[in-house]
């Protein structure tokens, strides 16, 4: 073999070794896609005006007030005895993709900021100030002196960090849309190109391909909420085993703290029994007759506060008694009336399929999760579920936002 051929062979072997050794690190990623399209070999960001532009991307922008929830498999449904005899939440194994969720309930000061910006520029969300106002009369009771909360709960500074209540499911959805608009506008102005910043100032959408903006804020699905509340990552043993099952967002079968200086204290803000909302003066247990701060009580293993107690929370799903039998086992949700009708054996009033009774079920009935300051311990269990019309509001229901996790875990 000639010297020239030997040199060629040595060079080829060296190149093969380099490629083999660096193959793993040289593969394109979302942050480092390389300079060429792997399918066509065409150059990214070439000198040609028609070349495909690929923006620099260093991961999704920081999500305000949100925690990353690593998805996985869990048992969805109620572990508790079905005291209501509804039989609408039987246990089944499902998987939930990773997502983001607010670490706290949306607070009064968050909502007051929303009201301020809506009143100054309703074009951002298309919602009027009147449409965004919570119903503060939810505090009014004919046989109780809660009148002071009607005027003070939302607006007095002392209640700033308490969860907003008196908001409907529809109002919560509007808030999610507004939050998406204002957060992405700020990101585009601060981190986008001049063209993107100008478009954001003019209220124009910023392309998702830019990587500058975040996915939409939204209400969590029932499955996401249940999964995040249980926070089973704190119970993992070897080989995908859990050391126990959780009834509440914390370990153990008690609603009291078993550890340290706070041993015996309640782990959530709830009603301990008839007429007992907080304990005895001088040693108030959960410290709140009604709601408390969104940061009160220890967070669960995902870092989420008040996934039991304080206020119940709206989720995305419409209510159906047989959701557990209908939904997919990956990212389950009941979004609409799909599968309803006589051919599936359902007899819902809204479709006129009534036999011996009239059903309360319709497409405006939404699920809400978790117990509130006015609920007994049974409703602190993560798997319990209730429902209410999407345009109704109470002093016990608030919400928090969620967001998909774009890309890899």
Image (tube, rainbow, N blue to C red):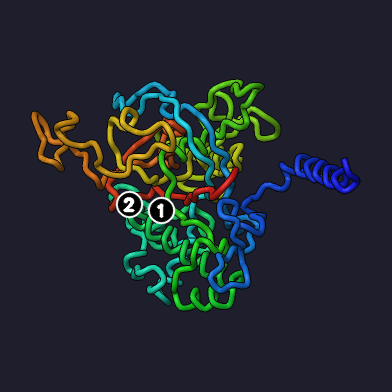
In the depicted view, which residue is nearer to us: 171 or 340? Answer: 340
Q: In the image, is residue 118 above or below residue 4?
A: below
Residue 51, quarter of picture: bottom right
Identify the residue under disc 1.
165
User: Dots 1 and 2: beta carbons under 8 Å?
Assistant: yes
Q: Position of residue 154 (x, y in %)?
A: 44, 60
Residue 341: percent from the left, percent from the top? Answer: 17, 36
Question: What residue is shown at x 59% (from left), y 70% (from top)?
Answer: 192
Q: Which residue lies furthest to the right in this view?
A: 3
Q: Position of residue 55 (x, y in %)?
A: 60, 64
Residue 399 left/right relative to 144: right
Q: How many marks?
A: 2
Q: For the point 61% across and 67% down, which residue is it?
A: 45
Residue neighbourhood size for the residue with mark 1, other residues' Cα within 10 Å, grouped as few (<14), some (14–19), many (≥20): many
Q: Is mark 1 on a helix, strand or loop?
A: loop
Q: Of helix, strand and loop, which one carries label 2? A: loop
């Amino acid at each position: 073999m000639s010297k020239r051929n030997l040199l060629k062979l040595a060079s080829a072997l060296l190149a093969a070794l380099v490629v083999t050794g660096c193959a793993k690190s040289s593969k394109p990623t979302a942050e480092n896609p390389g300079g060429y399209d792997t399918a066509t070999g065409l150059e990214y960001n070439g000198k040609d005006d028609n070349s495909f532009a690929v923006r620099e991307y260093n991961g999704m922008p920081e999500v305000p007030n949100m925690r990353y929830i690593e998805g996985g498999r869990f048992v969805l449904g109620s572990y508790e005895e079905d005291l209501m005899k509804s039989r609408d939440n039987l246990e089944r194994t499902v998987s939930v993709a990773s997502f983001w969720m607010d670490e706290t309930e949306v607070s009064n000061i968050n909502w007051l900021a929303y009201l301020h910006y809506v009143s100054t520029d309703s074009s951002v969300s298309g919602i009027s100030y009147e449409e965004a106002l919570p119903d503060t009369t939810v505090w009014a009771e004919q046989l109780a002196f809660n009148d002071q909360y009607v005027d003070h709960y939302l607006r007095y500074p002392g209640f700033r960090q308490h969860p907003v209540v008196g908001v409907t499911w529809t109002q919560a959805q509007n808030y999610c849309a507004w939050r998406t608009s204002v957060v992405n506008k700020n990101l585009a102005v601060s981190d986008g190109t001049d063209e993107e910043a100008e478009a954001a100032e003019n209220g124009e959408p910023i392309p998702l391909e830019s990587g500058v903006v975040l996915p939409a804020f939204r209400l969590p699905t029932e499955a996401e909420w249940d999964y995040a509340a249980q926070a089973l990552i704190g119970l993992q043993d070897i080989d995908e085993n859990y050391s126990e099952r959780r009834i509440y967002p914390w370990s153990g079968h008690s609603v009291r703290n078993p550890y340290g200086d706070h041993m015996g204290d309640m782990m959530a803000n709830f009603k301990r029994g008839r007429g007992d909302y907080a304990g005895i003066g001088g040693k108030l247990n959960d410290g709140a007759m009604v709601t408390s701060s969104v940061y009160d009580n220890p967070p669960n293993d995902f870092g989420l506060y008040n996934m039991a107690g304080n206020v119940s929370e709206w989720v995305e799903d419409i209510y159906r008694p047989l959701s557990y039998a209908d939904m997919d086992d990956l990212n389950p949700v009941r979004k609409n009336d799909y599968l309803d009708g006589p051919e599936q054996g359902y007899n819902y009033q809204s479709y006129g399929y009534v036999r011996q009774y009239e059903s309360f079920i319709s497409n405006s009935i939404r699920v809400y999760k978790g117990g509130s300051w006015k609920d007994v311990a049974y409703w602190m269990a993560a798997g319990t579920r209730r429902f209410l019309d999407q345009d109704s509001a109470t002093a016990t229901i608030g919400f928090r936002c969620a967001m998909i996790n774009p890309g890899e875990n």
